[in-house]
Image: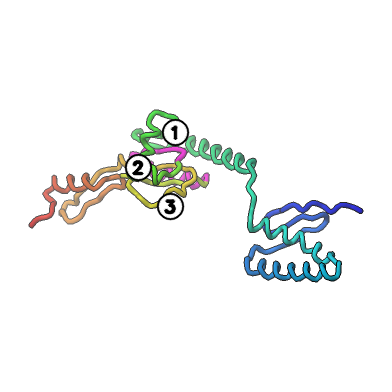
Amino acid sequence: MPSSPVPSYLGDGRLNAGNHAYHVSCDLHLFASFLTHLLSLFDSASRSSKSQPVVMLLPTLAAWLLCLFPVTSAQDAVAAQSAQASAMKSAVADITPGLSKGAVITLPFQKRWVELQVRGSSPRVSPAYTAVVEVATEQDVATVVTVANRYNIPFLAVSGTHGWTKTLNNLPYGIQIRMRKLDSTTVSRDGKTAVVQGGVLQYEITRALFAQGKYAGK
């Protein structure tokens, strides 16, 4: 008696079993209905000793289970990490010539790397960066964002690094855009408004405003 072909998952809800490709949906409600029907067939088969209807549905069941519980192999993980490393290498190469003289790129294992990872909420909140770009001009920021989007690399702009939101830990890898060099506060001529850059801290704003005679009175 010929052996049955071993089903293999094709993705997108398709299962290859011999000469047939079974199409399934990953909808949980449909899966529940399907499972109920399958159990009833098992019950009928046990009474009549006819298991063929059940066997015909097994490839679909296998596809559904693979769809609901996908398995990522070690090879897939290694391939993903390799692709990320390649994308980051290309991104850094593209970013470098577009930065101003005051901007600095720091990579893992370089001297200041650990220093640039410390946050006010460390280690509770520790995004997984792969590179840090200390920008010095607004155009530097635009350059980093443009290249990061080109290679689909996540990025996060930081200033005082005091954010406590746990979702920051969802950054799997990417670029830290460090804004601290953009720390100026410019008061308008009429003294009614001020332009503050993205890397400025609260005490720096207060100090700049006080120097212009702007402070809370009685």
Q: Secondary structure at mark 2?
A: loop
Res. 28 image quadrant: bottom right
Instruction: Specify whether 75 is left or right of 8.
Output: left
- Is residue 134 on the magenta stretch? yes
Residue on which the image places disc 3: 167
Q: Nearer the viewer, residue 23 or 104?
A: 23
Residue at the far right in the pictured view? 1
Residue at disc 3, secondary structure: helix
Q: What percent of the width, then of the height, locates residue 43?
A: 78, 69
Residue beneath the point at 41% across and 34% down: 105
Mark 2 → mark 3, Cα distance in angstroms: 14 Å
Mark pair 2, 1: CA separation: 17 Å
Q: Is residue 106 above or below residue 215?
A: above
Mark 1 against mark 3, which lies toward the viewer?
Answer: 3
Mark number displayed over residue 107:
1
Residue drawn where x is 45% and y is 41% of the image: 129
* Label 2, residues with CA under 10 Å away: few <14, some 14-19, many ≥20: some
Tell me the residue that label 2 is attached to.
119
